[in-house]
Image (cartoon, rainbow, N blue to C red):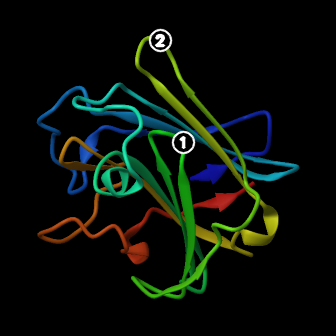
């Protein structure tokens, strides 16, 4: 898959379980749009209204519940994890390999946008600056964690959901 330059977007639907199975709750779904622009990599998420979601949750409640997890992998196996909560908060972390966290980039001034529409849809945007992007993007994947379920754009192997499996992510590059 190819992440295009502006004004085009790569659209990634998230609607199946992490293992490729059918999600038991049809209300859970999300779309992620990716675009390379002059400021870096734009990540836009559109998420349906979640069952049981309430505004003003604590950070701990959100980390344990509704979020989008986006992974971009360099050809050397290092990767960046971007976590966007449904209330607009985010974390960005760097990894040297699966579950080998080496950096937090939460002190970087990311350009973000958050909007909750009247119909319950939640829109989030974050721009990852060029200096944090992989020098050679090789793979990516995106997940929705909500309603006690883990959904994925591209399914993962294993008996339990482990999002930190960059070797199993689909191949990708930036245009």
Mark 1 crowd level (few <14, some 14–19, many ≥20, 10 Å Cα) = some
Helix, strand or loop status at disc 1: loop
Up-down: is 128 above or below 28? below
Q: Would residue 98 appear left or right of 160 to someone viewing this image? A: right
Q: Which residue is mark 1?
A: 88
Q: Which residue is mark 2?
A: 118
Q: Residue at x 39, y 83 (%)?
A: 99
Give coordinates of residue 55: x percent, y percent. Answer: 39, 32
The mark total stands at 2
Q: Would residue 27 appear left or right of 133 to someone viewing this image? A: left
Mark 2 crowd level (few <14, some 14–19, many ≥20, 10 Å Cα) = few
> CB of mark 1 within 8 Å of CB of mark 2?
no
| 3D distance between C-alphas at marks 1 and 2 | 16 Å
Q: Residue at x 57, y 37 (%)?
A: 124
Up-down: is 153 above or below 133? above
Name which of mark 1 and mark 2 comes first in the sequence: 1
Q: Residue 53 — which label?
A: none
Give coordinates of residue 59: x percent, y percent. Answer: 41, 54
Q: Residue at x 34, y 25 (%)?
A: 49
Helix, strand or loop status at disc 2: loop
Q: Would residue 96 appear left or right of 4 to someone viewing this image? A: left
Up-down: is 134 above or below 46? below
Where is residue 13, by image quadrant?
A: top left
Where is residue 16, by image quadrant?
A: top left
Query: Residue lying farthest right?
Result: 38
Give coordinates of residue 141: x percent, y percent. Answer: 45, 58
Q: Residue at x 45, y 62 (%)?
A: 170
Give coordinates of residue 64: x percent, y percent. Answer: 28, 56
């Amino acid at each position: 898959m190819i992440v295009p330059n502006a004004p085009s977007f790569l659209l990634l639907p998230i609607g199946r379980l992490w293992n490729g199975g059918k999600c038991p709750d049809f209300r859970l779904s999300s779309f992620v749009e990716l675009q390379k622009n002059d400021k870096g990599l734009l990540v836009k998420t559109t998420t349906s209204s979640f069952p049981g979601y309430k505004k003003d949750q604590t950070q701990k409640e959100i980390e344990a519940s509704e979020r989008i997890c986006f992974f971009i992998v360099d050809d050397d196996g290092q990767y960046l994890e971007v976590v966007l909560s449904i209330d607009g908060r985010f974390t960005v972390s760097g990894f040297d390999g699966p579950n080998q966290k080496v950096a937090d980039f939460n002190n970087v001034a990311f350009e973000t946008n958050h909007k909750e529409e009247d119909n319950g849809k939640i829109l989030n945007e974050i721009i990852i600056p060029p200096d944090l992007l992989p020098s050679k993007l090789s793979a990516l994947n995106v997940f929705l964690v909500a309603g006690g379920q883990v959904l994925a754009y591209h399914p993962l192997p294993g008996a339990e959901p482990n999002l930190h499996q960059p070797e199993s992510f689909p191949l990708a590059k930036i245009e």
